[in-house]
Amino acid sequence: MAAPQLRTGAELHALVERLYPICRSITGDGVRQTLDIIGEHIPLERHEVPTGTAVLDWTIPQEWNIRDAYVATPSGERVIDFQELNLHVVGYSVPVRQRMSLSELREHLHTLPDQPSWVPYRTSYYAPAWGFCLAQEKLDTLPDGDYDVVIDSTLADGSLTYGEHVVPGRVTDEVIVSCHVCHPSLANDNLAGIAVAISLAQQLVDPYYTYRFLFMPGTIGSITWLARNASRIEKVRHGLVLACAGDPGPLTYKKSRRDDAEIDRVMQHVLRSREHRVVDFSPYGYDERQFCSPGFNLGVGSLTRTPYAGYPEYHTSADNPGFVSPAAMEDTLGALRDAFGVLDRNRRYVNLSPYGEPQLGKRGLYDSLGGRSDAKQAQMAMLWVLNLSDGSHSLLDIAERAGLPFDIVDVAARALHDAGLVKE
Amino acid sequence: MAAPQLRTGAELHALVERLYPICRSITGDGVRQTLDIIGEHIPLERHEVPTGTAVLDWTIPQEWNIRDAYVATPSGERVIDFQELNLHVVGYSVPVRQRMSLSELREHLHTLPDQPSWVPYRTSYYAPAWGFCLAQEKLDTLPDGDYDVVIDSTLADGSLTYGEHVVPGRVTDEVIVSCHVCHPSLANDNLAGIAVAISLAQQLVDPYYTYRFLFMPGTIGSITWLARNASRIEKVRHGLVLACAGDPGPLTYKKSRRDDAEIDRVMQHVLRSREHRVVDFSPYGYDERQFCSPGFNLGVGSLTRTPYAGYPEYHTSADNPGFVSPAAMEDTLGALRDAFGVLDRNRRYVNLSPYGEPQLGKRGLYDSLGGRSDAKQAQMAMLWVLNLSDGSHSLLDIAERAGLPFDIVDVAARALHDAGLVKE
Amino acid sequence: MAAPQLRTGAELHALVERLYPICRSITGDGVRQTLDIIGEHIPLERHEVPTGTAVLDWTIPQEWNIRDAYVATPSGERVIDFQELNLHVVGYSVPVRQRMSLSELREHLHTLPDQPSWVPYRTSYYAPAWGFCLAQEKLDTLPDGDYDVVIDSTLADGSLTYGEHVVPGRVTDEVIVSCHVCHPSLANDNLAGIAVAISLAQQLVDPYYTYRFLFMPGTIGSITWLARNASRIEKVRHGLVLACAGDPGPLTYKKSRRDDAEIDRVMQHVLRSREHRVVDFSPYGYDERQFCSPGFNLGVGSLTRTPYAGYPEYHTSADNPGFVSPAAMEDTLGALRDAFGVLDRNRRYVNLSPYGEPQLGKRGLYDSLGGRSDAKQAQMAMLWVLNLSDGSHSLLDIAERAGLPFDIVDVAARALHDAGLVKE
């Protein structure tokens, strides 16, 4: 049976809605269920890395799984209920089963007083703790008294799970696209990114580069991948961290630490025709933090719409499927397709006839009737490619220098290549 | 008998008018007649390169000569007449002698519907063809019927002709000034350039560099020169392609492909005091295309007034002697004299007393009465030359850094040189 | 007895007033008296360099001392009197004792016609001459007739005097602060600078660099110091020439000849929070001319308020203690303290865990409760230091790149250093 294809904004949004209820964390069955669903669309190589494995400066933590959690009145009325919204439990909470007074419980409750109807998202990955998140306005209604507090979770040796999908290219040099899959019921962060990445992977046909899509928990996932792929990293020529792909804001490209890596140039080139912002690298945000740590310093940028922590709904229950739109996800997908379309064809050619202009006319590459002032764009593109193909200018360099569309420059280069005037 | 000197705008313009009627092309007697007239003003070394000679990627074409051409009614009335204006014949037209209907003839007629009273200029150098150019309003008056079509031209083995004039300098490093001489009755493009170049050559006295003036057909001429001067090219330190030197527009300097060659810096420096534009290099225009092809990549820019194809009269009968003015040619000539004046004196000196300031007073180079706040420009120039003459700054660098006129910096450097404080 | 401390603007101003009456020149007892007073505040190593000593391209001149000078009527009324204001005598005037007519005398009189009530400051160091300076309005009252002209000065072999104060640092690399001490009764130029430098020296406690304060006559003093310290110069990492430290204008930083020396970056960084101007290097002004001569090319900038010759009172009797204010000197001092505070801590660290982010949480360096969007500045500073500490970025580079205060970046780097994550 053919894998279902994600093509339209509506199809992307439907996947977001399907993934939304799953309780993901940096380890555990929520990630596995998510990878199962991704795997229905694109082949996925799954990895399980055991608890305790050393990965760079870190160690794979115990695996966390949760079955139920609630705060209930003595009469059994659940006033905070994980089943209703998985954000209600602080991620990685240790198990609890205890009756306590509201004032004791309060130390474990997190709200957003400024957004009293929203439930915050909180985790405590690397320090044993437990807690509940709830709306401030809900908390305000809780009467004093005792409550039954239950978190039916497990923290135990297990593994960290991530998945890879590879689209083989004509060369083994790689482009990586990385999405974090560790957030529970948060739509923009990062179910929209997952959906867009799947669609992008499905649409890559016979690319030049080998494209590797990484679906991994944030931070520890990318650190694990980097630790386990030391020999592959030198093959990674370009990359993007994709997140927040569906909110109403304009596209935002965050440059790599290198600041002028080829992906930085390509993204800025294709975004010029869309509403967008470009921001400098900073060592905060998503997994570009790891890919761009100084030891690796990869040419990996980050594409989002509104960036990390830049919208009020960020890390709250308001980041739900209603917050992401089919149109926004289509726009993100379109920009990525354009960008990889340029990146994948961005060659450097060398003019084999660099002394004077070669005679284009005798090769059928040029109008024979001289004296006309309206040199056509295609001919200008040929002249630019010949003039700048000295080994140091890529087609993108040439397109930007010439003020010509990349596609026309690419076509001109191929024509010159076919005529034997340039070589790759 | 002394050669006639071109000094005033009126003298420049008179030469344009004298050269205007000649039917030039990339080969043939029109070029030879033009070089004869140039040679009346400055000594010219003539070169004849035989048809069939391989020059870089090109081959010297057959030589084209034309004696007469017309379209006439059966009664012998010439409705299109080469004798009246040589633009009426498409350049390099193969011979024709035929009676044909107007509708057959129309495929060979070129007009400018948007400028119905102007005759376009067309050529077909590298594909055998023939044609006539005429005003649209003339074409509109031609009745249907048969016409006698005659082009009494010859395409035969011969040679390509070009001329060189050299002003020897104190060093063998060269500055080239290149003018195309292949256009028939077009005044701005490039008779004005030829006239200005002659005047400039006449006014160079005992220069530092060796100046080489090249009067050659466009494209094939510069390619021929480059092919035949492989060993000289490494002597070419700077150069200018000069064209469109007389139209009413402001001066336009087009930078070399290097973008910051010394000629680029010099031209921008001297143009600052005139109305002007500076444009980036592009591989389109005049023979800078060849000099700046990536294999040569010479420091050759291009000076025009309105640039290539940038005015409606371009490549039409409206580019006649009335389109170019004595004042505009004088202005072009003045800018060139200023520029070569700077270029020719733009040395790099080395401060022989670089530790602390040398004591200028004891050498008579400085006011002895201290405490005054009005340091004179000449003294400032000496301090700047001493401070920046570390081998990496030219006098132009120093003038621009100091915000001082080049002449004052040059005088200061010579004074320091005479005092033994700097060496070249 | 403890040396008197200069801390407040009032204390700085009192020192200016005390130094004001002394008649200083490039040599002589006025400099010695000035160094005596400086030496009451900070230990000073004194140097006497004999007349005739060759220093770079210069020679130590004869020593000039003056006891009295006046122009008097035959009846003995002093109409111009050195005792009243030492600016009345042209510095380095040869001795004179002569009766002459006013018209003969006029050739030796200097006034400021545009500022008729001010007395100009003039010198004639390197050519034997004599003269008087006076207010134009005073000159206008002098009746014709004969005058007794007396300059009781001595020009004789002696020595040039300068002083050094060193604050030893943890390293022998040096920062120099240079003040000229050769001007007679001029307050801003440079008594204010001397006072600020003393205060700065007193407040340096256990610095990283070794700080060397130089109190020397202008030009010949710095040339002498450079000539006598050839082996020390390679230890000079940074420096400042301090002058005009008390006038009402905003702070002005003049960059070193290097243009981006570390001192240039530091000064611009700390001045951003104050009203200020930054100007490019020029080989004119104070002793930065010598330190930045091309052979030395030291990283030495210049801090003034209104720069050299930039105010009407410059080199006139109007540059008196009333022209400089306690508040302005405090502001200059504050900027210098800030600057040396940054310079002294501006290290380059190397991240010892450059592959991925090190786990800050397990080292107690990071909040353990994830999911919060309000990353604190201190944590951001740690991430930035880790990300950019690749050996090529200093803490100042990091602070500017991150948009964080230098102090916070410095604290973060020390915390990471203590945790063993970075090394110096």
Image (tube, coloured by chain):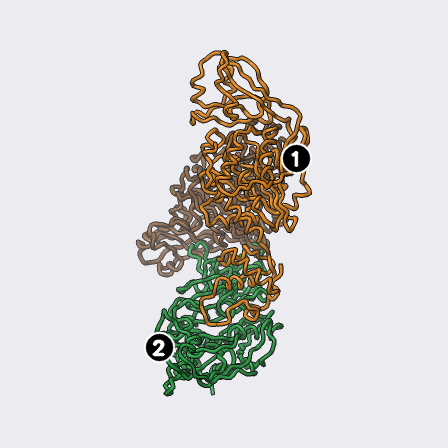
Chain colours: A brown, B orange, C green
Q: How many labels were placed on the picture? A: 2
Instruction: Return the x and y of residue A107 as percentages of the image width and height.
Output: 39, 60
Up-down relation of residue A60 to residue B71 (above or below): below
Q: Nearer the viewer, residue A386 or B254?
A: B254
Identify the element where label 2 is drawn: helix
Residue A46 visible in this rendered orientation of the protein: no
Q: Do badges 1 and 2 share one subunit?
A: no
Query: What number is the disc on residue B47?
Result: 1
Up-down relation of residue B402 to residue B113 (above or below): below
The quadrant of the picture occupied by the C terminus of chain B is: bottom right
- In this rendering, would B391 be left or right of A303? right
Decide: few, some or many residues near mark 2? Use Cα within 10 Å; few <14, some 14-19, many ≥20.
some
Decide: few, some or many residues near mark 1? Use Cα within 10 Å; few <14, some 14-19, many ≥20.
some
Chain of the residue displaying label 1:
B
Query: What number is the disc on residue B148?
Result: none
Q: Which amino acid, by three-letter code, is at mark 2? A: Lys
Q: Which amino acid, by three-letter code, is at mark 1? A: His
Q: Nearer the viewer, residue C125 or C315?
A: C125
The quadrant of the picture occupied by the N terminus of chain B is: top right
Q: Nearer the viewer, residue B110 or C382?
A: B110
Instruction: Return the x and y of residue C101 as percentages of the image width and height.
Output: 41, 80
Tell me how far mark 1 sits from mark 2, CA to CA.
81 Å
Instruction: Tell me what residue is drawn at x 46 percent, y 72 percent.
Output: B371
- In this rendering, would B285 be left or right of A82? right
> Hey, which quadrant is residue C391 in on the image?
bottom right
Instruction: Return the x and y of residue C211 as percentages of the image width and height.
Output: 53, 74
Q: Nearer the viewer, residue B332 or A157?
A: B332
- Location of mark 2 (residue): C138
Instruction: Return the x and y of residue B345 as percentages of the image width and height.
Output: 57, 53
Identify the element where label 1 is drawn: strand
Chain of the residue displaying label 2:
C
